[in-house]
């Protein structure tokens, strides 16, 4: 450190100046984390930074500037962040010397996100850092704050010249925005207008952590690096598609956020529709950020609108009642601490949607997401049409539909269900699985989604982030459902915690001749949908 004076009131660590480096060519940069004293920073973001550092993937000396209010001082903040890293990082047990290195680069700007003074303090940090380091470095601003704070943060970042539409020398500036991006189509449009009025679209990284999951990235690889699937990937050969996002956990500590959002906003608008778009899109010419997002956008714009008077025909919402999850008694949603009495927020939603284009005309896509369900399971199951004629007479009942199950989590992998002759003198046919498990096929542990996405944002790769028009298209599809629910007198249907959702969700899928695939475990598979 030279003799420059440290800005007053700031708690700066040592070794501020980042140095160039890395396997993935990440330029020297500073990482500014808004909401650093919040849950996401504790559970996901700092653990991701730690694991990336352990893998030597970050620019060495990456300064981590934490903006928040809850911690009283830098020592309190770093102790608390250390605890999150020790409990949650992929790389465990905690390597104390590595943590010390990271902690020495954490700065704390304690302040209110709506207050000018916070941004003046940040400007001072950067002015000081530029003097110290000799050359300006890139700036990545990560907004892990409640969504209500986004507009103010954007305005302040722009007004203080912390994010500028054009790079200044080597100093690029980018903004990563956590979900939810808007609450409906109008608010998403307004937020897009604001952010793209202040910054260039290329500087805005809209986060959906599912896009950083290895298994979600593999959807495109499965489809487009293997020539055997694509000829069958259409309405002539596929009978239906199910996307399940089941969680065993309840609302955990996020009651305020969740009660104002509900599952349609929290899980379907982003994770669910992103996975649907990746499953249904046309092959992009290349995996360039815009080429990929153009194709996903076409799918989202082809979703058949659900008119208000048909919402109950195509969508079921539910709320968990007391029950038993994984052997433990679980309270109902209304009994969870701090949930407003009589809340009608949905903790489960099931939808039947159609994609009106030549590839998918008439094929139902069923989506469901829920909390406190039987078990954690995220998967996409593609069910192929039955054989046009079964030549096996009495053994025909063993001939099931072929299914391709893409297991996003847990037991990450892919299963293809086939019919096979049971060994023996007669002719009996059984459905059998052909499995690929990541854990067996690849020796090393995959990175966490947040690791990949932080690294991509630092490297300037937007492929795994949502684009503004895509976010608006998904809200456009879902907003009539939200409006109908607001207007309607009926609330969500009850389901017991630990079940697969309300009975109405079964009826929804049965009406179009299918059934939910509810595997109790991995052995319970390869049944007809
Ligand atoms: C988040 C939702 O986006 O995803 C949470 O806000 C949900 O409510 C979480 O629990 C699920 O993520 P994962 O990676 O555990 O499937």
Image (cartoon, grey):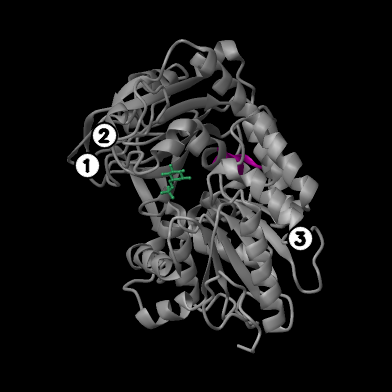
Q: Please tell me which residue lies in front, 345 or 419.
A: 345
Q: Disc 1 designates what residue?
A: 326
For label 3, count other residues whose C-alpha is less than 10 Å away and answer few (under 14), some (14-19) or many (20+). Answer: few
Could you tell which of marks 1 and 3 lies nearer the N-terminus? 3
Q: Disc 2 designates what residue?
A: 498
Q: Is residue 524 left or right of residue 220?
A: left
Q: Position of residue 159 (x, y in %)?
A: 75, 54
Image quadrant occupied by the N terminus: bottom right
For label 1, count other residues whose C-alpha is less than 10 Å away and answer few (under 14), some (14-19) or many (20+). Answer: some
Taking 36 as reference, is 333 above or below it?
above
Q: Does the magenta stretch include residue 279?
A: yes
Q: Disc 3 designates what residue?
A: 161
For the record, the magenta segment spans 273-281
What residue do we see at 63% from left, 64% from top?
121
On whether ligand 1 comes within 8 Å of the CB at mark 1, the answer is no
Taking 74 as reference, is 206 above or below it?
above
């Amino acid at each position: 450190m030279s003799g420059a004076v440290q800005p007053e009131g700031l708690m700066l660590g040592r070794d501020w100046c980042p140095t160039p480096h890395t396997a993935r060519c990440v330029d020297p940069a500073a990482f500014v984390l808004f909401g650093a004293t919040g849950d996401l920073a504790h559970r996901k973001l700092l653990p991701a930074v730690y694991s990336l550092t352990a893998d030597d993937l970050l620019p060495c000396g990456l300064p981590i500037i934490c903006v928040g209010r809850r911690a009283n001082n830098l020592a309190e903040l770093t102790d608390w962040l250390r605890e999150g890293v020790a409990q949650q990082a992929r790389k465990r047990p905690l390597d104390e010397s590595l943590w010390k290195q990271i902690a020495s680069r954490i700065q704390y700007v304690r302040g209110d996100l709506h207050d000018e003074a916070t941004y003046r303090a940040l400007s001072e940090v950067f002015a000081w850092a530029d003097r110290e380091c000799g050359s300006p470095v890139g700036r990545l601003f990560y907004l892990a704050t409640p969504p209500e704070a986004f507009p103010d943060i954007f305005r302040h970042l722009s007004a203080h010249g912390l994010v500028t539409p054009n790079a200044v020398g080597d100093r690029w500036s980018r903004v990563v925005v956590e979900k939810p991006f808007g609450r409906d189509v109008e608010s998403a449009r307004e937020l897009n207008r604001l952010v793209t009025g202040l910054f260039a679209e290329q500087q805005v990284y809209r986060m959906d952590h599912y896009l950083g999951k290895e298994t979600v990235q593999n959807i495109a690889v499965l489809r487009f690096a293997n020539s055997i699937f694509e000829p069958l990937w259409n309405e002539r050969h596929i009978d239906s598609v199910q996307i399940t996002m089941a969680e065993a956990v309840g609302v955990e500590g996020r009651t305020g956020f969740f009660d104002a959002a509900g599952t349609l906003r929290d899980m379907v608008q982003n994770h669910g529709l992103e996975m649907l778009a990746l499953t249904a899109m046309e092959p992009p010419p290349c995996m360039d950020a815009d080429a990929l997002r153009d194709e996903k956008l076409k799918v989202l714009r082809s979703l058949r609108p659900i008119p208000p008077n048909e919402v109950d025909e195509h969508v079921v919402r539910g709320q968990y009642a007391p029950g038993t999850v994984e052997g433990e008694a679980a309270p109902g949603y209304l009994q969870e601490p701090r949930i407003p009495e009589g809340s009608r927020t949905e903790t489960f939603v099931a939808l039947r949607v159609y994609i009106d284009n030549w590839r998918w005309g008439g094929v139902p896509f069923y989506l469901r997401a829920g909390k406190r369900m039987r078990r954690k399971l995220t998967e996409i199951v593609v069910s192929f049409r039955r054989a046009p004629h079964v030549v096996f007479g009495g053994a025909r009942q063993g001939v099931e539909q072929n299914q391709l199950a893409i297991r996003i989590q847990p037991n990450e992998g892919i299963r293809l269900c086939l019919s096979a002759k049971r060994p023996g003198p007669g002719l009996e046919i059984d459905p059998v699985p052909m499995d690929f498990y990541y854990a067996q096929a690849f020796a090393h542990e995959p990175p966490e989604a947040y690791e990949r996405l932080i690294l991509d944002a630092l490297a300037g790769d937007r492929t795994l982030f949502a684009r503004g028009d895509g976010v608006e298209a998904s809200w456009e599809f879902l907003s009539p459902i939200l409006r109908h629910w607001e207007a309607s007198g009926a609330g969500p249907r009850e389901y017991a915690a630990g079940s697969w959702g309300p009975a109405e969700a079964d009826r929804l899928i049965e009406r179009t001749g299918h059934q939910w695939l509810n595997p109790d475990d991995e052995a319970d598979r390869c049944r007809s949908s």
